[in-house]
Amino acid sequence: MARRIWSVAKYALLILGAALMLLPFLDMLLGALRTPAERLARPPVYWPRDPQWGNFVRVFDELPMLRWLTNSLVVTGTITLLQMLTSAMAGYALAKFQFRGRLNVFRFVVGAQMFPFFIFLIPWFFILRYVPLLGGNDWTGTGGAGLLNSYAALVLPFAVTWYGIFLMRQFFLTIPDELLDAARMDGAGEFFIFFRIALPLVGSGLATLGIFVFLYHWNEVLWTMTVTRTAPDLQTVPVGIYLLRGAFEQEATKSLQQAAIFVSVIPVIVVFLALQRYYVASVTSGSVKG
Amino acid sequence: MLQFLSSKKAAPWLFLSPVILFAAVFFVLPVVFAAYISLTTWDSLSPPRWMGLKNYQYLFATDPIFWKTVWQTLYFALGTLVLGVPLALVLAYALSRARLQGVWRVVYTLPMVTNIVAVAFIFTFLLRPTDGLLNRLLDLLGLPGPGWLTDPSLAMLSAILVFVWMELGRNMLLFSAGLNSIDQSYYEAASMDGAGAWSLFRRITIPLLKPTILFVVITNFISGMSYFTLMLVLFPGTQGGPSRAALTTGQYMYQMAFEDLRLGRASAVSYVLFALVFVATLVQLRLMRRGGLEEH
């Protein structure tokens, strides 16, 4: 009897929870489909009677949505490739070479993970602002805006991920040394061995890291918002929508805002659905072994 | 030279060189720079002026808002733990014993991959006082709908609930991984002895899942202490919600730096908050080691 109750209760629980997860998205979709008249009616209409699917087209016509999407893709894509490359190289060095200082480098990588992101907000901003000889700056780092108004400001501070190095090291540890030594005997150079032999063997590890980084940085808001507040040409999808909120003060325009928000969520959901196996692995690999 | 660069001796350093360069410019330099700035007064327009420890002294002894933000940060971090972790554990437990695991998992992790601006705006609409979905539902039940985001006594609670909604999937994934690593034979043996669902959960699941629970609790606590992007976008145009009721220390630092240009004092705030988070991290390591998780 108790068992029967439990097996019903667990599905009831899961369905209730799933409803709570999905309802907010549905609420947003319904909002995006309302007509201005439905929004202004007293009391306001909840179910749109004449769904305005055209709002999803207007988002591209009336907002810089394509610009934002391009920026998101360029910035997130570059960060993802850079982090995969730097993590793989460093993780490989730490896993497959014996050299003096290796333990200290490893300790540094682990220790650096303890530094929370907010510590870097202020110094990064001003390091990029006062970088010498770039972005109109003279050798003392003044005179121009430095790298602030460029893609570099959005990408460079995220070129390396300490967690990624740690993760890739774990994956490279599973490759037998004999394999690499055999290639050395055959006269292969170190770069050839890394790119043509070792790297292909950790493909699933790279995918795990890549999907995690991509989703994380597609959704990154705090830093991008700080750097691009005065550079609309560099804003990414979420940041653009947030900083343009002033244009949607009028109740009648809010359907368009909600449509834009919906559009901002779609790309990650597609990527996520396609690669969720790797994503699940990336979330749990930092936790408990097994 | 070329021969040395392609030798096995030079290789690890060549592979590490991008990271070393990055560490110098974007890690060591910022940490030192922020520490120095925290000992000065600086508005970024004129050169910094040396202040010694005065910024820290001001925060601890004079600033009335700073301590308020520390307590509110703790309230946020603990609130998300108390509401979020048991919920995630129970749901992950139900999930681990249900069919269609893949489908449930996708549904529960959707909020986690949704960007924070979308999350904040979704809930700004959903929590609107008169025509938001939640208050419409309360109205159907004949209950009065409060101003979830405008009432100072509710603002932080609302932020906590949104955060729990957002992070539920991540915690469930972690718990699911832990649950899957528990040997099924324990359950079988206990079932043979006549143990019910609840006593299986309490006597087998909870004790064997202790390392995972500890990991989830502590990482959630640390990220909760450092977190403020949600509050920044959930209460735009305010100084951290109505009457600063949802102002956390991180956001206080952010506004001090990028709106008031008090960069010295803001750096001091970031270092004090860092110290608090660091203590929590050390406690984490200590507890984990005792909990039998040598990995970390």
Image (cartoon, rainbow, N blue to C red):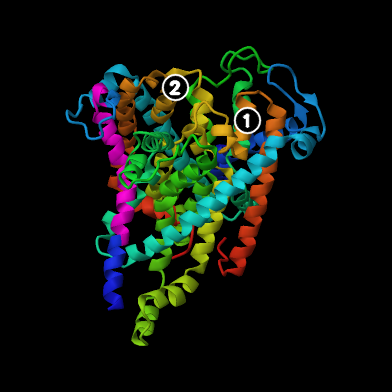
Q: Are marks 2 and 1 in contact (CB under 8 Å)?
A: no
Q: Earlier in the sequence, mark 2 or mark 1?
A: 1
Secondary structure mostly seen in magenta is helix
Callout 2 amino acid: Leu
Q: Is residue A170 visible?
A: no
Q: Percent x, y for residue A185?
A: 46, 55
Q: Is residue A152 above or below residue A81?
A: above
Question: Which residue lies under the disc numbered 2?
Answer: A234
**Horizontal relation, residue A135 to residue B147: left or right:** right
Label 2 Cα crowd, 10 Å radius (few <14 / some 14-19 / many 20+): many
What stretch of residues is rendered in magenta?
A13-38
Measured along the vertical axis of the image, is residue B174 above or below residue A111?
Answer: below
Residue B150 locus on image (x, y percent): 49, 34
Residue B199 position by quadrant: bottom left
Q: Residue furthest left?
A: A50
Q: Residue at x 39, y 52 (%)?
A: B169
Name the foreground residue: B183 vs B268.
B268
